[in-house]
Amino acid sequence: MKQFEQHEISTLFVKNLTQLNMHLHALNMELGLILSCFWSGHSYVMPVMQDAAFCRTSMNRIRSLTQLRGIDTSKQSTINSSTPKPETSFYKAKGEVVEIKTLEELYEAFDPQSGRTGSQVLNSISVKGDTQCVTSDHPVAQLLYERKSRAEKLPPGTSPLVENKKDGFKVALAIEGGGMRGCVSAGMVAALYYLGLEDHFDAVYGSSAGSLIGAYFITRQLPYYGPEIYYDILTTAGNKFIDTRRLLRAVGLGLLDPRLIKDVITRPRNGKPVLKLSYLLEDTVQFRKPLNWTKFVEMQEVQPLSVIASGLKSEKAMVFNMKSKSFQTLDGLAKCMHASMLLPGIAGPVMNIGTNKDGDQMKHLLGNDQSHLLVNGEPLADALIYEPFPYRSAVKDGATHVLILRTRPDGVDVTGKQGIFDKLVMRRFFLKKNKLRNIFDRIMNQLHKLRYGEDVIIMNEAAKTTRDYRDATSEDPLLMPIALPPGSPEISRLENDREAILAGVRRGFARTYDALINDPSKRGMGAEIAKAMYPDEILKYDPSECDSDKLSAFEVHLQRSNPELLKEISKRVRAKQ
């Protein structure tokens, strides 16, 4: 655990000093913004005073942190501009984009004393995943197959999920989200199911869309029923799920689009969102493709799901599960998932969680600036802000081994570049609507990108480990990341093309199969098997004509049109390999 603690300390330094630098600049800039930002009016007077107060607070935080940790800040290259920059420093490559490969380089890039804004830093660096070396020889995979081997020898009726706990390890599955990019992780968990590894995880953690994938993994509604939500339901929903016409409303300029005038007039405070999570988490998960709630509850004793979201008041990752009574019903679970998936400014108002006045019932309330209506109310948004990869929460819960499913390909720059549209959306959502200055500063300083970059670099190193699988503790865990190969097409968060989403499912399945198959002679066959499991036949039926609350649409279609293919696929799934 020491490596994670060290990273947290360094991040705290960068956070406080970067915020301090940002606020010093803001003191000179805010008055200009009062005049130039016509949609904000008097709301910028308060931030000016807050900037001055924040500068004092940040200095106090830094002093307290150094005293608490006994750290000599003069030796920290990430926060001390007087430290000589090494020849390989990105400062030597002004105007160029330099690939960052170590945490030290990353912290140096975000050095607040450089005078660069967060956006300027992102324009100067890139961070890329590099994990294609992982195979079933990785110690996390070795433990999974050790458990599978033991399970095959158990007496009939004995649950491997119970027996696994006797080996003294805790194996977690951590699933990244990413909007419609979740189709990749849907294919990945289908491959775990196909390989017969589903019963050898002690807990599942999901960030954003990863929480949805994790839920259908736990209920074993695979390999079609759960993934069909992506390529059958959401891609054929039209404006019921993704309505890009409302992007102008997200920046407060809805009146510029004649199609939105009525919405602006009748719903002046909260217009309809671009991404309608209620369609996914109410209409789909609870009715059209219902999660098997009975099975889900049963599994919480042996393979619980934890949903990760970002606490906007506490300014940290929040973990929600049935054990903590964060939810007790399918609707309650859907509300927690809503919080985890809530893209700021795009997916509507924040989700608030707290208790009633008696403190004996958990309450979920959707609405901006409404947390004060609940006892200990906490406004929540997308897990991306504080924990895009939920392995950190898994480790804090005692995980010794973590399999991490990534939805972005290796070789892709994960830092991203922030445009003017993003800035306008964030300013309107966090400052104007929710008065969350610290979260806005975090986004503008790109500290969420710093966390994402940290995680990718940590996973790159973890992929190369040669440690024995028995040499792991919750203080020094083993991590195994799986990501698509470099050059793989990347699914966008708002992708709605059915063929593209199905292809994403196939790629996720193929890469996970190739990474985890324990027969070396079968490595590289993932794409072929994925195409056999998810054939082009899927694109030939109309999902609305194949609805069933028990069978997948694909199975319904094959029952009607090609019973022989259904038998072949069913046989393949039962054989699992």
Image (cartoon, grey):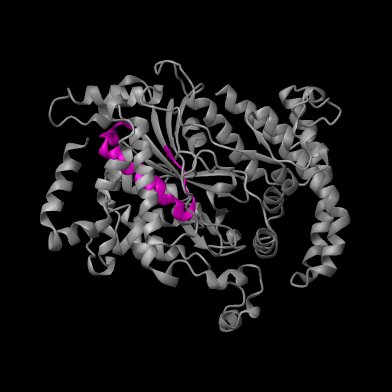
Q: Any magenta on residue 190?
A: yes
Res. 546 in view? yes
Q: Nearer the viewer, residue 413 or 2?
A: 413
Q: Residue at x 79, y 33 (%)?
A: 92
Hey, which residue is sitting farthest right in the picture? 28
Question: Which range of residues does the magenta coloring cover?
Answer: 174-202
Q: Position of residue 566 (x, y in %)?
A: 15, 52
Q: Any magenta on residue 406?
A: no
Q: Position of residue 6 (x, y in %)?
A: 64, 26
Q: Nearer the viewer, residue 549 or 47?
A: 549
Question: Left of 237 or right of it: where is 572?
Answer: left
Question: Left of 463 or right of it: where is 198?
Answer: left
Q: Nearer the viewer, residue 420 or 367?
A: 420
Type of secondary structure dominating the magenta stretch: helix
Query: Would you place residue 526 above or below residue 210 in this image?
Result: above
Question: Left of 154 or right of it: where is 125?
Answer: right
Q: Nearer the viewer, residue 94 or 577?
A: 94
The quadrant where residue 218 appears? top left
